[in-house]
């Protein structure tokens, strides 16, 4: 008799920055553990989009639950953060709690068909799913696409709102002093404005306490270098924390999930092939962020003045439609694009670059990044130092961690409104890319981290790395709970 597969239900918040890491986790589990099946739950438009991004040989089951954004005071057809202006994101979050009855129905009906799920893996914003799982006796884990340190700071911040209790610009997180001082400029706008009565505080005030009903947290990180946050989360929540990272989409799957073509991959690679080893600076602020027009101008001037080779993923500055055509003549210094093209010193990639291809290339020396955790992991896996320019969410904490604890980053600017001077940017670029003491030290540290990650991912007989072991531990914990419940049911019968 063929053993039937154990089913895992996955449920991300409706934002690309959440759906993509969940998809990566689903594909990771499917590929390594052939005897698990995955049910991926989301709303109609997100499921439609996911259909075209799954690899053809994937057996992930996409399960749609009803959601009509118009009924929640949102614009029609807005089921994903990416199509909403920033101020409506919280509305989508609040509306997402209305998915509870439909989600509960999905789990109940699986149970009624005699196929109770082995576990539910849900988003950090879906604390309410913990209660559903508990009520229906299903193992539950929260999956965070970010690192432990970033998540720990985020959790501690929202549960304490410590910035309100000080008059100075700096504060410490009262239950997470190991994280040392945090400056108010390291808070995203919704955090800076949080006072306990605003929509974000109210939402998080319900979301985070609900986590106690989960069985644990899966973190997209590596135990060996992310201890501080890891210890905090264990201590604070009294739950298991499984550091299973890095969980990332392969280049192929990413190309499918995005909108990119093979020509830009080939073009980029040929350009890099023509450059010296460790001579190129790669600049990208991720798919969701952009900088202000004046910051863009200063950055362009810095790149020219530095004399370094660079690949820059450009998007229209703040105040313009991020998906509109990039207007070099308007947003960059006069003649910039022509000069860098003629001198072959720089490459402007409009909207997208094959990031993994770039980071893995021998010519790439450093990555000027918004410090989104996926980008961070991709840089670290390839041993590329980071020049940090955090923009939103927990990216400020990531940058702080990378610089102060890991020593693989230098912060060059902070946020979308800070004043940036090109001289300062040049100084930071040279500090990291030149053969300075600091530059050498950073490269040494980042190559140590690269080895740590390699070891954590080792998956050989008798030699499992920490991340592989954490994933196995997580699955065993779920299986053991299920066996216990089955035992109870059988004994009772
Ligand atoms: C899946 O396979 C692994 C070994 O490859 C085994 O340890 C585990 O018990 C299996 N799980 C199920 C649900 O059959
Ligand atoms: C699907 O194909 C890819 C590439 O050929 C392979 O790496 C992966 O393991 C396959 N996935 C499954 C679930 O068989
Ligand atoms: C969503 O709700 C609006 C008004 O509540 C309705 O007009 C519209 O037809 C609904 N859309 C779908 C796809 O059901
Ligand atoms: C970095 O290297 C460039 C080119 O060799 C040189 O002009 C510049 O002064 C150096 N800067 C530092 C801080 O070492």
Image (cartoon, grey):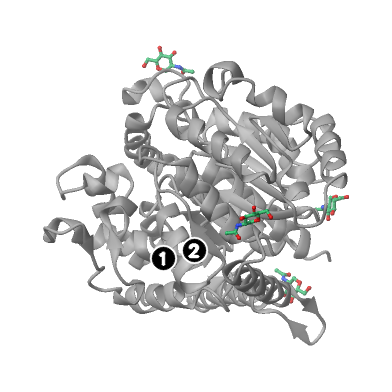
Q: Is residue 216 among what the camera can see?
A: no
Could you tell whether 328 is left or right of 485 in the image? right
Q: 63 or 165, which lies in front?
A: 165
The residue under the point 67% across, 65% down is: 435
Q: For the residue carrying disc 1, how many other residues have a C-alpha within 10 Å: few (<14), some (14-19), or many (20+)?
A: many
Could you tell whether 232 is left or right of 436 in the image? left
Ligand number 3: quarter of image = top left
Element class at badge 1: loop
Q: Position of residue 312 (x, y in %)?
A: 65, 37
The residue that disc 1 covers is: 214
> Tag 1 or tag 2, which sits nearer the N-term?
2
Q: Residue 141 has which mark?
A: 2
Element class at badge 2: strand
Badge 2 vs badge 1, beta-carbon distance below 8 Å: yes
Could you tell whether 383 is left or right of 288 in the image? right
Marks 2/1: CA distance? Answer: 6 Å
Q: 429 or 190, which lies in front?
A: 429
The residue under the point 54% across, 72% down is: 242
Q: Residue 101 has which mark?
A: none
When asked about the image quadrant of residue 69, the answer is top left
Q: Position of residue 424 (x, y in %)?
A: 46, 49
Q: 292 or 493, which lies in front?
A: 292
Question: Is 343 drawn above or below residue 134 in the view shown?
Answer: above
Question: Is 266 drawn above or below residue 397 in the view shown?
Answer: above
Q: Position of residue 231 (x, y in %)?
A: 42, 79
């Amino acid at each position: 008799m063929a053993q039937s597969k154990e089913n895992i239900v996955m449920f991300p918040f409706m934002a690309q920055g959440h759906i993509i890491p969940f998809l990566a986790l689903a594909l990771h589990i499917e590929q390594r553990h052939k005897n698990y099946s995955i049910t991926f739950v989301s709303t109609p438009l997100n499921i439609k989009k996911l259909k075209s991004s799954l690899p053809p040989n994937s057996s992930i089951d996409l399960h749609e639950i009803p959601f009509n954004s118009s009924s929640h005071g949102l614009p029609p057809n807005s089921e994903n953060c990416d199509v909403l202006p920033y101020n409506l994101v919280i509305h989508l979050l609040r509306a997402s709690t209305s998915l509870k009855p439909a989600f509960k129905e999905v789990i109940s009906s699986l149970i009624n068909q005699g196929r109770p799920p082995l576990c539910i893996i849900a988003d950090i914003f879906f604390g309410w799913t913990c209660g559903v799982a508990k009520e229906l006796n299903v193992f539950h884990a929260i999956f965070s696409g970010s690192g432990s340190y970033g998540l720990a700071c985020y959790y501690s911040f929202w549960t304490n709102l410590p910035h309100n209790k000080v008059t100075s610009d700096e504060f410490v997180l009262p239950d997470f002093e190991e994280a040392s001082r945090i400056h108010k400029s390291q808070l995203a706008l919704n955090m800076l404005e949080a006072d306990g009565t605003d929509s974000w505080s109210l939402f998080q005030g319900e979301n985070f306490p609900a986590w106690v009903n989960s069985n644990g947290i899966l973190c997209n990180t590596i135990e060996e270098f992310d201890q501080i946050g890891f210890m905090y989360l264990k201590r604070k929540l009294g739950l298991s924390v499984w550091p299973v990272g890095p969980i990332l989409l392969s280049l192929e799957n990413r190309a499918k999930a995005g909108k990119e073509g093979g020509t830009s991959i080939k073009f980029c690679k040929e350009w890099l092939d023509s450059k010296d080893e460790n001579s190129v600076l790669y600049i990208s602020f991720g798919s969701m962020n952009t900088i202000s027009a004046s910051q863009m101008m200063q950055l362009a001037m810095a790149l020219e003045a530095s004399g370094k080779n660079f690949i820059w993923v450009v998007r229209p500055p703040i105040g313009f439609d991020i998906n509109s055509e990039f207007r070099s003549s308007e947003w960059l210094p006069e003649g910039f694009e022509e000069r860098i093209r003629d001198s072959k010193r720089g490459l402007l990639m409009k909207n997208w670059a094959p990031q993994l291809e770039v980071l893995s290339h021998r010519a790439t020396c450093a990555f000027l990044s918004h410090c989104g955790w996926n980008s961070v992991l991709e840089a670290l896996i390839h041993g590329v130092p980071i020049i940090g320019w955090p923009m939103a969410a927990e990216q400020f904490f990531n940058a702080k961690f990378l610089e102060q604890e890991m020593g693989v980053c230098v912060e060059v600017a902070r946020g979308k409104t800070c004043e940036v001077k090109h001289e300062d940017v040049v100084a930071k670029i040279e500090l990291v890319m030149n053969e300075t003491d600091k530059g050498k030290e950073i490269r040494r540290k980042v190559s140590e981290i690269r080895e740590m990650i390699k070891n954590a991912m080792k998956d050989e007989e008798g030699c499992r790395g920490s991340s592989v072991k954490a994933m196995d531990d997580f699955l065993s914990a779920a299986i053991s709970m299920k066996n216990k419940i089955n035992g109870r049911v059988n004994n009772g019968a």
